[in-house]
Image: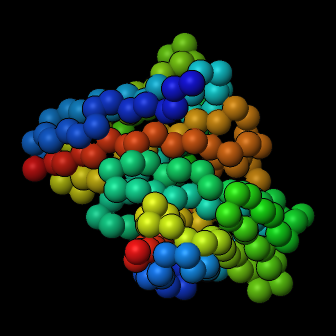
Amino acid sequence: EAGVTQFPSHSVIEKGQTVTLRCDPISGHDNLYWYRRVMGKEIKFLLHFVKESKQDESGMPNNRFLAERTGGTYSTLKVQPAELEDSGVYFCASSISVNTEAFFGQGTRLTVV
Amino acid sequence: GESVGLHLPTLSVQEGDNSIINCAYSNSASDYFIWYKQESGKGPQFIIDIRSNMDKRQGQRVTVLLNKTVKHLSLQIAATQPGDSAVYFCAESRGTSYGKLTFGQGTILTVHP
């Protein structure tokens, strides 16, 4: 069974450009989470989808970040326009239910120059 | 503020020794705790979890201990192997969703042959 997969694995963009990250959760997992780790800091929660609905987006840093999960399958996280401080590793995780462990993808390393 | 933190940023052990990684948390309302292992270039990998109604849980070569009195969590790895070398994160959840986690900084475990 495939785990959580993320695309791309690495992205380098210029400040002001737009980048879209994709996450494919484990099949059958209704819960999908986005996290990020910037500048050696702790991994921080961004938001939580239950199927296609945003359950909790309290961790989204600002309105330059837009997450979608149309159809309740894969999710995208768009950063527009990207700033230097957005550089970091963006992780996606999924779980079967809200009361079970979450499994993480390998992450997307975003570098904004 | 509420946080989950680690006592030691690095830990070096000899192959075959037992390893203990410690973690402190500050929110007494947390009811779910989880340990992840992260190897270079990979995402956090689930190791073991424990709910607040338990004080000990064992897996294969790993044991998690929870002391709610002093808000302390530890991960014990028996007969540590070179393949155990990685960054270990503890994380806690406050009940809304076990996938919405607050992570600690991480401990680097290095196992010497």
Against B89, is A29 above or below?
above
Where does residue B101 sit, x and y in percent of width and height? 61, 55
Q: Quadrant of residue A82?
A: top left
Residue at 80 percent across and 79 percent down: it is B67
What is the quadrant of the C terminus of chain B in the image? bottom left
Q: Which residue is the extreme one toward the right?
A: B53
Q: Which residue is the extreme one toward the top?
A: A71
Against B101, is A62 above or below?
above
Q: Quadrant of residue A103?
A: top right
Where does residue A56 sit, x and y in percent of width and height? 60, 41
Where does residue A92 sit, x and y in percent of width and height? 47, 40
What is the quadrant of the N terminus of chain B in the image? bottom right
Against A15, is B10 above or below?
below
Q: Quadrant of residue B33?
A: bottom right
**Colour convention:** rainbow
The one of A2 and A85 positioned closer to us in this rendering: A2
Q: Is residue A8 left or right of residue B112?
A: left
Where does residue B74 sit, x and y in percent of width and height? 67, 76
Residue at 41 percent across and 56 percent down: it is B39
Residue at 37 percent across and 28 percent down: it is A22
The one of A98 and A83 positioned closer to us in this rendering: A98
The number of callouts visible is 0
Residue at 62 percent across and 55 percent down: it is B47
Work out whether residue A3 can be spotted.
yes
Work out whether residue B4 can be spotted.
no
Q: Is residue A106 left or right of residue B61?
A: left
